[in-house]
Amino acid sequence: MAKKRIYEIAKDLGIDNKDVVNKAKDLGFDVKNHMSSLEDSQVNQLKGSFRNPAPAKKQEKAAKKSSKIKISVTSIRKNEKNHEDGKSNKNNRHNNNHRSNNRNRKEQDHSQQRSNREQSTRTQKPAAQDLLKQLKQKQRVEESTLNRQTEKARESYKNNTSKPQETKEETSAKKQEVVKVKKVETSAPKVTGPKIIKPSPARMKQNQTATSERPKAIDNNSVPEPAKEEKRRGNGHNSRNNGKPGRKGKNQAFGNNNNTYSKHQEKRKRKNKKRQYEQMPKKQPTQRKERPLPETLVYEVGMNAQDLGKILHREPAEIVKKLFMLGVMTNQNQSLDKDAIELVAAEYGINAEEKVHEDMSDIDNLYNKRMEASKESKHQIKRPPVVTIMGHVDHGKTTLLDRLRHTHVTDHEAGGITQKIGAYQVRIDNHLITFLDTPGHAAFSNMRERGAEITDIVVLVVAADDGVMPQTIEAIDHAKSAKVPIIVAINKMDAPGANPQHVTEQLMKYNLIPEDYGGDTIFVNISAKTGENVDELLQMILLQADVMELKADPKQKAIGTVIEARLSRGRGPVADLLVQQGTLHTGDPIVVGNRFGRVRVMTNDRGRQVEKATPSMPVEITGLNDVPESADKIVVFDDEKTARSVGEQRAQQALQQSRENVTHVTLDNLFDTMKKENMKEVDVVLKADVQGSTEALQQSLEKIEVEGVRVNIIHAGVGAVNESDVTLAGASNAFIIGFNVRPTATAKSQAEADGVDIRLYSIIYKAIDDVKAAMQGMLEPTYEDKVVGNLTVRETWKVSKVGTIAGAFVDSGYITRDSDVNLIRDGVVIYNGKVASLKRFKDDAKIVKQGFDCGLTIEGYNDIKIGDELEAVEQQEVKPN
Ligand SMILES: Nc1nc2c(ncn2[C@@H]2O[C@H](COP(=O)(O)OP(=O)(O)OP(=O)(O)O)[C@@H](O)[C@H]2O)c(=O)[nH]1
């Protein structure tokens, strides 16, 4: 038979080992401690003694206890708690023995408490029993609800975390689903009382604690504390946010433990921000006035959004946005290509036009462009006609203008002849006519021709008593070539020998046919002296102008032409000019021909100072850096800096041009020049290395005489050919002979620019032969030494058996192994010979080019010094001119 130990029996019975040992001893069993074993029969007996205590004793105990029982909810809850503690201890049976003993003791207590409770329950009031029942039911429902919520929350969390790629809609739907589920779940506890709370473990714990610790608070009508909190936070069943997807819902689903804290923090942050925002000084939103778009976007490739913004009167950010929408990723500062800029223009619905870079120095081109632009302009207005009076000498041109202006110009003229171009405006019937008084003398024919260029109408003055004369015909030709209509004024009708009919017939030969004869030329018989029909002439001019529809754009930058210019004492350069298009203002930066400046003072034809000059208005201006020439074009620039640079550039170009136009005497053209210009002397500037050479060469050259032409040495000196020598030769139409010397760098470039011929020799008779041959026209181009490279000696080494090695740097050109070299010291050729050896480092080199060092030796010459210059020379064929 199997034996059973005391502790096993105690365990089965759930009572203390000691009690079982004592009981066994009472029953007479031979036991010592809880390890003692008993037979089956003894075990049954022992267990039976515990299960069936004596009825008398039992009743007595129960009676005693029932009299003492005072039922209260608190005691019930305490018992309940003890009961639960006992239960939970049961779950930890696998703990160590010590714990096991404690547990056994507790179980024993519990057993006693349970029996007490059973007994007391029987004697409780019915209300207390109901309360207990409700409590248990609530607890069960609560637990089951929380378990379900936790499970759901876990699932939801899993779904959210395991599928991060879900679309917003899906996530949102899920959130809604979770919230819906919660809604359903939360509705269940509503029936039983407690509100649904967040399914976080902490919340569950809190809930359980609250349930167990506050039995007094349990009431059908009361809301448990956690539920209240839920309601306060809006997460409860009655929350406004209930069922809505969103952050709150999400937090519910996740059971955020720090929810309360984060919510408060968030709220506080929001409040702070709001307060900060309210405290900020309120800026009134600036209402940007939207300016209209230009008709055309004139752009340059490389412009950025900011540049375009300025042109289009739009914010750069707006342009960047538009480009972004068009698929062009850029920022405000990034340069844009042509396509991108044209896309922007198309987006705004305007044309795009690439700005062509102009040569600003070409003011004739600028002038023509502005003239063309004015014809297209919408701002065109009618302008006064510009009239030139032409005619033969003394036919009465100045008298006519005098009549028109009511002044007496003729009285002040030297010899009674109009010397200079003048311009005046005449008003008739509120219409202006601008007159240019063109000199009628043949010496000024060129000026007259220029005057015709700015003229709209030519009034051809023919003396009725003199008829058509040579300058009359010349005037007709100029007017016709300029396609300017002619109005014939037959003057001196008051003169005794006046024969207008004869004059008309003469003019008809030149295709000037009056309307009476079926032609279209206006003929007016006048007398400048008496004023007869002068008003009719003016009317005819206005009629002609109307037919021509002369217009101008006063809004554009002014262009014009110089009528005449002079240097005034005290006022500096003064120019009379005619504004042709646009409006010229005081202060405008201008370029006039090759001059530049700013309009300082502007005076009209009546000597009054004016601030602006409109089209067809003649004005006198000051403020130029130099006196311009008549017929020079005037162009207004945006700024003085540009005007200055253009003016200076043009002056430089003009100087260059004038130098190029001068043909200097050279040995090559000496013979031809002698013949052409009937020269008696050939001027020469002579430079040599030493005084002795200079004198020897000078004497030899002066002895040359070819067909009566002799050499004239205008300057002889010692040393390098310098700038002064070149200037002298240029001014004297001479050429330069250098004997064993070289020109300085500036002298060389100046000679090239001025076309001055410099001939370099190292043998006296060669120089004499060349000059003689040139004067005889026999100078045949052969071969000449050409310097192909320049070197500077930087180092020297003396090597026995080799001689002096020069370490040289090639400054320009190149040097070859076969080159001849000239050794120059202080501008004087010390030696010329051949390159003996040429090396790069230790290797022989055929050629060493600019920018490289080389080592070289010169045949038969060792006196090379640091700082010496070397010329690499090659023989090159010179083609005959
Ligand atoms: N009788 C008469 N004489 C006139 C008339 N108009 C001009 N004269 C005279 O003709 C002469 C020449 O007149 P100008 O006006 O100087 O002639 P111009 O064409 O200007 O001469 P230049 O300046 O040399 O080109 C003067 O003596 C005038 O008095 C006229 O209508 N009748």
Image (cartoon, rainbow, N blue to C red):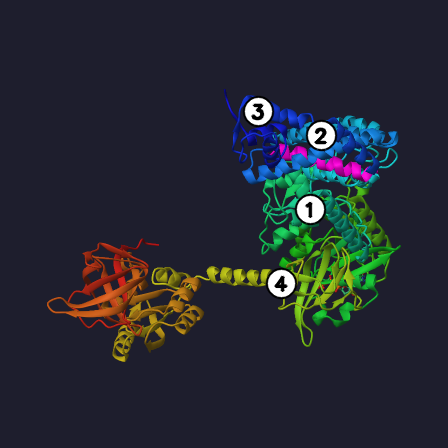
Mark 1 or mark 4: whose residue is earlier in sequence: 1
**Residue 744 in the image, given as x and y percentages of width and height:** 36, 70
Mark 3 or mark 2: whose residue is earlier in sequence: 3
Q: Which mark is residue 317?
A: 1
Q: CA distance from mark 3 to mark 2?
A: 53 Å
| Span highlighted in magenta in the image | 70-92
Q: Is residue 76 magenta?
A: yes
Whether the residue under disc 1 has CB within 8 Å of ligand 1: no
Q: Is residue 780 magenta?
A: no
Mark 4 or mark 2: whose residue is earlier in sequence: 2
Residue at label 3?
42
**Residue 576 in the image, given as x and y percentages of width and height:** 71, 64
Q: Quadrant of ligand 1?
A: bottom right
Residue at label 2?
149
Mark 2 or mark 1: whose residue is earlier in sequence: 2
Q: Nearer the viewer, residue 290 or 372?
A: 290
Question: Does residue 561 appear to the left or right of 36 in the view shown?
Answer: right
| Circle 1 or circle 4, nearest the eye | 1
Residue at label 4?
641
Mark 3 or mark 1: whose residue is earlier in sequence: 3
**Residue 261 in the image, given as x and y percentages of width and height:** 72, 47
Dot 4 and dot 2 residues touching (CB under 8 Å): no
Q: Decide whether the magenta segment is chiefly helix, strand or loop.
A: helix
Q: Is residue 495 visible?
A: no
| Circle 3 or circle 1, nearest the eye | 3
Whether the residue under disc 4 has CB within 8 Å of ligand 1: no
Q: Secondary structure at mark 1?
A: helix
| Circle 3 or circle 4, nearest the eye | 3
Dot 1 and dot 4 residues touching (CB under 8 Å): no
Q: Residue at x 26, y 57 (%)?
A: 848
Give the farthest residue toward the top: 1
